[in-house]
Amino acid sequence: MIYLAQLRTQLERTFSPLACECNVTGDHSLTIKLYHPASGQVDLVVSGLNVATLQSPESVAVLIEELRYELESNTLHRSDSVL
């Protein structure tokens, strides 16, 4: 399994200039929040991800592509889109 600090760093590099928070709950589900660090405006929150599935670089790459898709879907109608 990838460490949360590594995952957060990778997500912040991928989705720059957004910041990222990664939190694991008691049932081992992961919540990822992508937001603007200066304003705190949240662009995407995804909850309930299974931490156990993030065991390889390939699985993290799949997660990043899914997050990219969700983020693009959320920002299609915004003029200040990050992507």
Image (cartoon, rainbow, N blue to C red):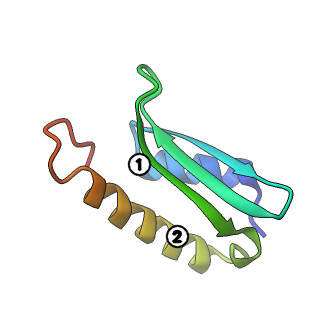
Residue sitting farthest toward the top: 38
Distance from Cα at disc 2 to Cα at disc 1: 13 Å
Q: For numbered disc 1, what is the local secondary structure?
A: loop
Q: Where is residue 25, by image quadrant?
A: bottom right
Numbered badge on residue 63: 2
Q: Is residue 28 left or right of residue 45?
A: right
Three-letter amino acid code of the residue under disc 2: Leu
Q: Is residue 40 above or below residue 72?
A: above
Residue at 73%, 53% in the rendered image: 4
Q: Is residue 75 left or right of residue 62?
A: left
Numbered badge on residue 15: 1
Residue at 62%, 74% in the rendered image: 57
Mark 2 touches mark 1? (CB < 8 Å): no
Q: Picture coordinates of residue 30 (x, y %)?
A: 69, 59
Q: Residues within 10 Å of mark 1 (few under 14, many from 20)?
A: some
Q: Residues within 10 Å of mark 2 (few under 14, many from 20)?
A: some
Q: Where is residue 36, by image quadrant?
A: top left
Of residues 25 and 35, the one nearer the viewer is 25
Numbered badge on residue 50: none
Q: Picture coordinates of residue 50 (x, y %)?
A: 70, 72
On the rendered image, what quadrant is the N terminus found in?
bottom right
Q: Earlier in the sequence, mark 2 or mark 1?
A: 1
Q: How many marks?
A: 2
Q: Picture coordinates of residue 8 (x, y %)?
A: 62, 48
Q: Picture coordinates of residue 56 (x, y %)?
A: 68, 77
Residue at 64%, 67% in the rendered image: 49
Q: Is residue 2 left or right of residue 8?
A: right
Q: For numbered disc 2, what is the local secondary structure?
A: helix
Three-letter amino acid code of the residue under disc 1: Phe
Q: Is residue 4 above or below residue 54?
A: above
Residue at 69%, 73% in the rendered image: 54
